[in-house]
């Protein structure tokens, strides 16, 4: 099979706003385009008089729209997201005329610290900037986004690249065919940024993992693009071990994604500012501004400083406030919202307080 047979369609896919298909996640160009194009607008809060004039059906539709909005609140720009975007976009410029040994970024941290969010927002930001620079170029695909499959093999990873680009993979296609087709298509469509999530699925301790790592390195040499990875606690794994690991460590900047801290006054101010930003996005009729910020210590304890857990807690409470008709978020309502197991365990430990020695 010749790489020339594998081509990208002339258009970007379905128009913005179309419903995504059953198999169009972010790891396809159609799903990625929808993600980049999507700009949800907050619903307008009606006055008491206008609200009272709605029919039962109109009120149900109005509440449904607000529930949908709160289920998918606009993203809060965290320090991690800003650092990832600033560092990575600088490297994109520095790598633009490099022929080899391009520098990259690894976003590393515990689950729930916003690694994937930072990675996808980097891609979204870069693509939107590129569209402004080249508004007439309908063939340009500046960002390629893939995830490393569990128990990945080099062929599986190469197929993920091909799937994003929409390239057909005949059963008889060998690894060289796939790689050549991906690299040729990525070059023609001007890919500048390759975002790869779930990097922790690669283990250099296994033969397959080492081969996948070599495949990524080969892609990075073939593609004139900046590679940005995200994974769980990468520094604690074996990705930087041995000859392969030293080469990775010598080319990549590691940016930590960590939970928010609450120990010092400055750290508390950062946390309170984050809560205040989320509170300003709420569209509830009876919510008093500042009442959520006043619960900042409670919110920190419930979420262990995890941005993902905080978002889930606030979004869930807002939905419950609409469904209950109270139209405000209270501590009692927040208690009714479940959080992930890691945050729940941290909250349980905090409630128990420091363990005392029985002998004292």
Image (cartoon, rainbow, N blue to C red):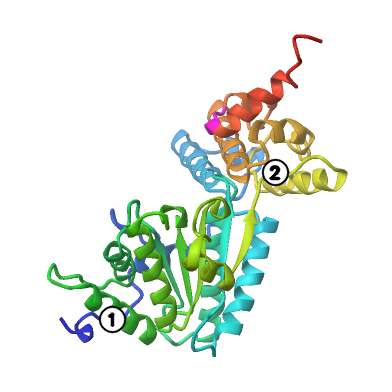
The chief SS type of the magenta part is loop
Q: Is residue 49 above or below residue 158?
A: above
| In this picture, residue 25 sits left or right of residue 334 | left
Q: Earlier in the sequence, mark 2 or mark 1?
A: 1
| Number of numbered discs overlaid on the protein picture | 2
Q: Residue at x 74, y 46 (%)?
A: 276
In three-dimensional space, the C-alpha distance between marks 2 and 1, rounded to whole angstroms, equals 49 Å
At label 2, counting other C-alpha atoms closer than 10 Å, the crowd grade (few under 14, some 14-19, many 20 or more) is many
Q: Is residue 341 left or right of residue 256?
A: left
Q: Quadrant of residue 182?
A: bottom left
Residue 317 is one of the magenta-drawn residues = no
Task: Tell me if 160 is positioned left or right of 252 in this view.
Answer: left
- The residue that mark 1 highlights is 180
Q: Position of residue 267 (x, y in %)?
A: 80, 46
Find residue 289 and name its label: none
In this orientation, which residue lies closer to the viewer: 218 or 341?
218
Q: Is residue 338 magenta?
A: yes
**Identity of the residue furthest to the right in this view:** 265
Find the magenta span and give its range. Answer: 337-341
Q: Would you call the spot at circle 1 few (<14 residues within 10 Å), some (14-19), or many (20 or more)?
A: some
> Image height check: is 25 above or below 215?
above
Q: Nearer the viewer, residue 290 or 306?
A: 306
Q: Helix, strand or loop at disc 2?
A: helix
Q: Quadrant of the C terminus?
A: top right
The residue singled out by tag 2 in the image is 279
Give coordinates of residue 316: x percent, y percent: 56, 35
Q: Position of residue 8 (x, y in %)?
A: 29, 79
Q: Secondary structure at mark 1?
A: helix
Q: Quadrant of residue 205?
A: bottom left
- Residue at image x 66%, y 42%? 47
């Amino acid at each position: 099979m010749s790489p020339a047979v594998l081509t990208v369609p002339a258009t970007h896919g379905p128009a913005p706003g179309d419903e995504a298909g059953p198999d169009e996640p972010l790891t396809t160009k159609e799903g990625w385009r929808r993600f980049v194009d999507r700009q949800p607008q907050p619903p307008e809060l009606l006055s008491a008089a206008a609200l009272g004039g709605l029919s039962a059906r109109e009120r149900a539709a109005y509440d449904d729209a607000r529930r949908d909005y709160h289920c998918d609140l606009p993203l809060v720009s965290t320090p991690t997201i800003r650092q990832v975007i600033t560092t990575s976009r600088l490297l994109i410029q520095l790598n633009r005329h490099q022929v080899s040994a391009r520098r990259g970024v690894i976003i590393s941290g515990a689950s729930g610290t916003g690694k994937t969010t930072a990675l996808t927002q980097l891609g979204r930001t870069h693509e939107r900037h590129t569209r402004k620079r080249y508004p007439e170029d309908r063939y340009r695909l500046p960002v390629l986004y893939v995830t490393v499959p569990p128990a990945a093999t080099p062929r599986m990873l190469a197929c993920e690249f091909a799937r994003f680009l929409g390239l057909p993979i005949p059963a008889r296609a060998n690894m060289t065919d796939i790689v050549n087709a991906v690299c040729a298509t990525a070059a023609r469509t001007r890919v500048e940024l390759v975002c790869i999530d779930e990097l922790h699925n690669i283990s250099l301790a296994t033969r397959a993992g080492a081969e996948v790592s070599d495949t990524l390195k080969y892609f990075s040499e073939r593609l004139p693009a900046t590679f940005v990875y995200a994974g769980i606690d990468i520094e604690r794994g074996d990705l930087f071990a041995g000859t392969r690991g030293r080469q990775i460590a010598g080319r990549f900047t590691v940016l930590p994604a960590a939970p928010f801290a609450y120990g010092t006054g400055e750290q508390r101010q950062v946390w309170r500012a984050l809560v205040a930003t989320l509170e300003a996005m709420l569209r509830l009729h009876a919510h008093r501004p500042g009442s959520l910020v006043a619960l900042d210590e409670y919110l920190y304890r419930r979420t262990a400083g995890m941005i993902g857990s905080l978002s889930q807690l606030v979004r869930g409470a807002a939905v419950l406030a609409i469904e209950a008709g109270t139209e405000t978020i209270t501590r009692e309502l927040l208690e009714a919202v479940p959080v992930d197991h890691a945050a729940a365990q941290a909250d349980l430990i905090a409630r128990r307080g420091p363990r005392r020695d029985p002998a004292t």
